[in-house]
Amino acid sequence: MLILNNLISISWQQVLMWVIGATLIYLAIKKGMEPTLLLPMGFGAILVNLPFSGVIDQMYDGELEEGVIDILFRAGIANELFPLLLFIGIGAMIDFGPLLSNPKMLLFGAAAQFGIFFTIGLATLLGFELKDAASIGIIGAADGPTAIVVANFFRSNYIGAIMVAAYSYMALVPIVQPPVIRLVTTRKERQIRMEYAPDSVSQKVKILFPIIVTIIAGIAAPRSVALIGFLMFGNLVRECGVLGSLSQTAQDVLANLVTLFLGITVASKMRADLFVTPETLMILALGLVAFIFDTIGGVFFAKLLNLFSKKKINPMVGAAGISAFPMSARVIHKMGQQEDKQNFLLMHAVGANVSGQVASVIAGGMILSLVAR
């Protein structure tokens, strides 16, 4: 009788979420798209949409029985712990050497955040509250942890859809960016070669860089201190030279473990009643718009610089200014090789890509400061 009641209580929205969960698992296993995140996210989506699921909070005989996934959400995402711990691992992975040897690449990280602010305005015009519009716009950075922190800070009504969109577009960089770049560049522009003659960067500079960036960002946008601070702390652990084993642990064990918990915890906000809404489709579409316009913003900025520069910049490098490190840099290098097998854009693209990681975090902090006022 109990099983029959459970079967009767299943809604089509829950079945749809099972399908979405299964799709995420398929993309993780078969396509290799962010498997450490999409697989637990997909399985979690199935778990929370089973009838009277014990993994989420339920009322039994007038008493609240806490579910483990809701407990994890309150302990790890509601207080921003998981995303910030993940930033330590990400910071430990990043080598700022290519950026420090060619500092002008910082400009591309800034330019490639255009889509964020464009989409905030568009989402507001479409009727979303400013706090939700700000949370949706940050999807364009292709920076999942920052998207989570911003959406959670504003207590967005659509945090589940925002999380799914942010991480999905991170995984879809190799699919989305190439056609967009080809649309706004000519073959001649894509064939532009860039010489790479890096200046040697001392360990002292690499150690000072995360400290100075944290201070500057903290003064400019105080609410970004947690975001940029944890990212730069991870990088300091990498570059200090005395914490080699901890740096490796942060890059491998910490980053993978936190990502695993983050993925399954995100499912707390993927319940059918919260997720299966017309607004979710709009958020997915707006997230794609933000991502596309971030890419276009970086490309157009490179074209603008070429009007005044003797040494031409391949506009595709500007598209690497998003935060999806190192996927975007690899995509740009591959596209350059397809156009000209002697064109090596990887290190230039990496410089723009790591600057995008920093810029997206600062952009998130600026949004927190501006919108929260």
Image: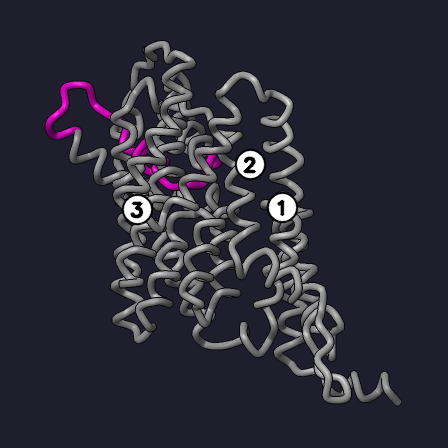
Tag count: 3
Residue at point 50%, 32% (across, down): 234
- Tell me if mark 3 has few (under 14), some (14-19) or many (20+) residues whose alpha carbon lies within 10 angstroms of its own: many
Q: Which residue is mark 1?
A: 258
Q: Which residues are magenta?
A: 306-327
Disc 1 is placed on an element classified as helix
> Any mark on residue 113, and which?
3
Where residue 64 sits, quadrant-wise, is bottom right
Q: Amino acid at mark 1?
A: Val
Q: Quadrant of the C terminus?
A: bottom left
Q: Residue type at mark 2: give it.
A: Gly
Q: Mark 2 near mark 1, Cβ–Cβ under 8 Å?
A: yes
Percent of width and height locating residue 191: 30, 25
The earlier-in-sequence mark between 1 and 3 is: 3
Could you say whether the residue bearing mark 3 is in a helix, strand or loop?
loop
Residue 227's place in the image compared with 48, above or below, is above
At x 47% / y 54%, what residue is drawn?
166
Q: Position of residue 56 (x, y in %)?
A: 69, 71
Residue sitting at the far left: 308
Quarter holding residue 86: top right
- Kind of residue at disc 3: Gln
Which mark is first along the chain, 3 or 2? 2
* Residue 223 appears left or right of 278: left
